[in-house]
Amino acid sequence: MKYYSTNRKSSPVSLREAVIKGLAPDGGLYMPERIVRLPDEFYRHIHRLSFQDIALTVAQAFFGEDIDAQALETIVRDTLTFDCPVRPLHDHLYTLELFHGPTLAFKDVGARFMARLIRHFVTTDSQTIQVLVATSGDTGSAVANGFLGVDGVQVKVLYPRGKVSTIQESQFTTLGRNITAIEVDGTFDDCQSLVKQAFIDAELNERLHLTSANSINVARFLPQAFYYFYAYAQMKLMGREDQLVVCVPSGNFGNLCAALFAREMGLPIKRFIAANNANDVFFKYLQTGTYHPKPSIPTIANAMDVGNPSNFARILDLYGESYEKISALISGSRFTDDEIRTAIRTCYERTSYILDPHGACGYQALCQQLQTGEHGLFCETAHPAKFKETVDALLPTPVPIPERLSRFLQGQKQTLRIENDFAQFKALLL
């Protein structure tokens, strides 16, 4: 299968080239030339399949033309060594827990799959690949741990200084080996801009083998569709799959994009809600039909602190830039920090379930927008202990820190610090 650029000013490429390059030469994001619709039979019996078997069927539809069946099965099964369970909360509300992977965040699925796919592609390549990733929190830890110790791969994690939680920071700054953490005096959008500039810099691309591990890379966001199919299977087992509404806490919009792709493959989702924090450019687009990126605003739901979400380009492309189609399928919500805190407190008082700040946006959005007869499913994207200071202040008892997180906190921080300056970043890479 070929992959084309959303800017449509460069030639289509193979999967290998799309994954290794990350970003198209014209600055666009790669999209598969077609989306395979899965047969009705698959959906009729999906609740009888394991997570890995469901994911393998989806992966074959995405990547089966380019990767042999045995290699793809190995990649999928090595990626999904943990569960993504659906939990009932109250009324017709359910949560999809995506924090059971190695770094306790939803990005473990896409990052682990991408690491294994790149390793598959570079086994015969003698040149070291430089993976560049900008993070507002969980992406950095998921990517760093996914690539840790992989031969032939060096990872550079750029993050905004002072704008990620202590636990999040410890998960990618204490690893060493082939992982380099870079503190940028700026915002996540500044970090993302530095990465994008690197991909279109002629000298860097001539001298280095660059790729991205953000959701701009097709190997990062497409595998995130796996857990939406698995969530539907679990809802079907409970007899709650009809009139399914999926709410996705949204930052760079890779997670919502994966859900939209799943629906285009035939997954029976009625509609979507994009839950935003104060960084509400997509929410305003849904209200007005105009898109105006703006500088990001720091919030307690920091993984959503994105003022110019890259994957908006994919959403536009997927629906032919039709505002009518997009707004008919996706509604939006926006929450302040105080409203997020209230949602965490209210959910705990009602159910004893502890939300993280991002999941709290999804929970509150469904509480406000779910209609009679619908079943609502929201993504709980990270373990609440990763935001311990915020969550502990709202609950009667502190959130226990899982052992996996405790081990990161015991490590020694190793970082490089740069200004928000591309020349300085380029010199560091060279």
Image (cartoon, rainbow, N blue to C red):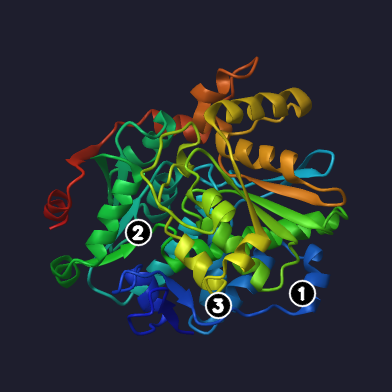
Q: Characterize the local packing of mark 2: few (<14), some (14-19) or many (20 or more) Cα atoms within 10 angstroms.
A: some
Separation (CA) of disc 2 from disc 3: 21 Å
Q: Is residue 164 left or right of residue 158?
A: right
Q: Characterize the local packing of mark 3: few (<14), some (14-19) or many (20 or more) Cα atoms within 10 angstroms.
A: few
Q: Nearer the viewer, residue 225 or 69?
A: 225
Separation (CA) of disc 3 from disc 1: 21 Å
Residue at 34% across, 50% down: 134
Q: Nearer the viewer, residue 238 or 135?
A: 135
Q: Which residue is mark 2?
A: 150
Q: Quadrant of residue 264?
A: bottom right
Q: Is residue 408 left or right of residue 283?
A: left
Secondary structure beneath label 3: helix
Q: Quadrant of residue 58?
A: bottom right
Q: Which residue is mark 1?
A: 42
Q: Which residue is mark 3?
A: 70
- Whether pointer 2 and pointer 1 mark residues with C-beta atoms closer than 8 Å, the reply is no
Three-letter residue code for mark 2: Val
**Percent x, y of residue 341:** 59, 26
**Numbered marks: total:** 3
Upstream in the sequence, badge 2 or badge 1? 1
Upstream in the sequence, badge 3 or badge 1? 1
Three-letter residue code for mark 3: Gln
Which one is in front in this view, the residue at disc 2 or the one at disc 1? 1
Q: Is residue 356 left or right of residue 41?
A: left
The residue sitting at the top extreme is: 396
